[in-house]
Image: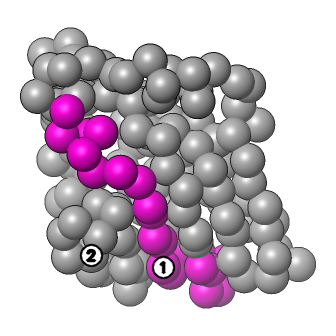
């Protein structure tokens, strides 16, 4: 069985370096990425993904994305983690999430993330990260 968790780790390591092409190397040409918890339409296709990641990269000062739990069953990976970063203006964003990845030909084909978009909106508005969120994130990454 393919080690799809390692593919996910490759994506995370690439994104820590702001290496868009490194991320894309692990994604299927027909990637579908539901990255807004259902708040916006999914991103479809590698070209759109590239444009989205390039735009995101320009808004970030750093990236501390990490996983707390991860499991693989066949061609699916379940993950729990935090998307944590500082924006270019120094605002700290920390969004706990869960997600499911589906793989095809060893590459991520479908990517769904579930999180509370209200937390993200609060943090972007400058209200800070809630202590309840920090308490959730105070544990070792895997």
Please give the name of the residue rendered at 48% of the width and 79% of the height, measured from the top-left corner: 110
Between 64 and 46, the one lying in front of the other is 64
Task: Tell me: 12 left or right of 76.
Answer: left
10 Å neighbourhood of mark 1: few (<14), some, or many (≥20)?
Answer: some
Please give the name of the residue rendered at 45% of the width and 63% of the height, measured from the top-left corner: 113
Please give the name of the residue rendered at 79% of the width and 68% of the height, measured from the top-left corner: 72
Mark number displayed over residue 77: none
Mark number displayed over residue 42: 2
Relative image position of residue 121 (x, y in whole percent): 18, 40
Which picture quadrant has residue 75? bottom right
Q: Secondary structure at mark 1?
A: strand
Dot 1 or dot 2, earlier in sequence: 2
- In the rendered image, the quadrant that contains the N terminus is bottom right
**Residue 54 falls within the magenta-colored stretch:** no
10 Å neighbourhood of mark 2: few (<14), some, or many (≥20)?
Answer: some
Please give the name of the residue rendered at 35% of the width and 51% of the height, measured from the top-left corner: 116
Relative image position of residue 3 (x, y in whole percent): 80, 66
Mark 1 sits on what residue?
Answer: 110
Q: CA distance from mark 1 to mark 2?
A: 10 Å
Q: Residue furthest right?
A: 1
Between 138 and 100, the one lying in front of the other is 138
Relative image position of residue 37 (x, y in whole percent): 34, 63
Q: Is residue 62 visible?
A: no
Between 110 and 57, the one lying in front of the other is 110
**Residue 108 falls within the magenta-colored stretch:** yes
Q: Secondary structure at mark 2?
A: loop
Which residue range is magenta in the image? Answer: 102-122
Q: Residue furthest top?
A: 90
In this rendering, is residue 132 above or below 104? above
- In the rendered image, the quadrant that contains the C terminus is top right
Relative image position of residue 86 (x, y in whole percent): 30, 21
Task: Tell me: 100 left or right of 56.
Answer: right
């Amino acid at each position: 069985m393919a080690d799809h968790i390692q593919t996910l780790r490759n994506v995370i390591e690439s994104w820590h370096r702001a290496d868009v092409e490194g991320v894309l190397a692990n994604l299927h040409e027909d990637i579908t990425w539901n990255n807004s918890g259902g708040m916006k339409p999914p991103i479809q296709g590698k070209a759109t993904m590239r444009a989205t990641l390039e735009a995101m990269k320009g808004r970030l000062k750093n990236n501390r994305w990490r996983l707390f739990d991860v499991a693989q069953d066949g061609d699916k990976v379940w993950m729990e983690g935090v998307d944590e970063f500082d924006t270019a203006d120094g605002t700290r964003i920390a969004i706990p999430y869960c997600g499911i990845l589906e793989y095809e030909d060893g590459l991520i084909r479908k990517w769904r993330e579930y999180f509370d978009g209200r937390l993200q909106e609060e943090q972007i508005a400058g209200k800070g990260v809630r202590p309840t969120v920090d308490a959730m994130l105070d544990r070792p990454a895997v």
